[in-house]
Image: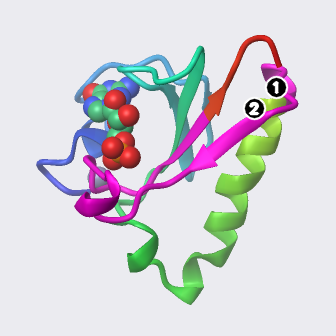
Amino acid sequence: MSLDCVFCKIISKQIPSQPLLETDDLIVIKDIAPQAPIHYLIIPKRHITNVAALQLSDRDLMGDLILVATKLSQMVPASAFRLITNNGAAAGQSVFHLHFHFLADKAN
Ligand code: 5GP
Ligand code: ZN
């Protein structure tokens, strides 16, 4: 847990949220400023800065994060969607706690 991290605060319930899905290891919430009709954030509960900070031991967790996108695509349902992660400020990362954006159009 990182004390000044907004996602850590959401995960620890210091900031209330309504998760769409939650397991022991990850949480899915709606993005506060959606860039598409469906914009979810898939977030590991453990504070990892970004993809560049991943270690080999994170491989199971990473598999789980991607497979949640599969589950979301069935829940929505969205046959077409984008799964994006920004790595570093210059690439558009603004929250330095690893997350995947799940973006879809309701028409899909
Ligand atoms: P990044 O820019 O790091 O790739 O994505 C961070 C995302 O987190 C942004 O799309 C932003 O709208 C979202 N975000 C930032 N603060 C909050 C928050 O407090 N709650 C939720 N649900 N999303 C947030
Ligand atoms: Zn964090």
Q: Is residue 34 left or right of residue 88?
A: right
Asked if residue 13 shows in the view, the reply is no
Whole-percent x and y of residue 67?
Answer: 77, 51
Whole-percent x and y of residue 15?
Answer: 25, 25
In the rendered image, the vertical position of residue 22 relative to residue 33, given as above or below: below
Q: Nearer the viewer, mark 2 or mark 1?
A: 1
Q: Name the colour scheme.
A: rainbow
Q: Is residue 107 magenta?
A: no
Residue 104 is drawn in which quadrant? Answer: top right
**Dot 1: element:** loop
Q: Is the Cβ of the residue at disc 2 closer than 8 Å to that at disc 1?
A: yes
Residue shown at 72%/64% (left/top)? 63
Numbered label attached to residue 72: 2
Q: Which residues are magenta?
A: 74-102
Within 10 angstroms of label 2, few (less than 14), some, or many (20 or more) residues?
Answer: some
Query: Which is nearer the N-term, disc 2 or disc 1?
Result: 2
Q: Is mark 2 within 8 Å of ligand 1?
A: no
Q: Is residue 99 left or right of residue 72?
A: left
Hey, what amino acid is under mark 2? Leu
In the picture, the quarter occupied by the N terminus is bottom left
Q: CA distance from mark 2 to mark 1?
A: 8 Å
Hey, what amino acid is under mark 1? Ala
Residue 7 is drawn in which quadrant? Answer: top left
Residue named by callout 1: 78
Residue shown at 36%/20% (left/top)? 33
Q: Is residue 93 left or right of residue 78?
A: left
Whole-percent x and y of residue 31?
Answer: 43, 25
Residue shown at 12%/48% (left/top)? 4
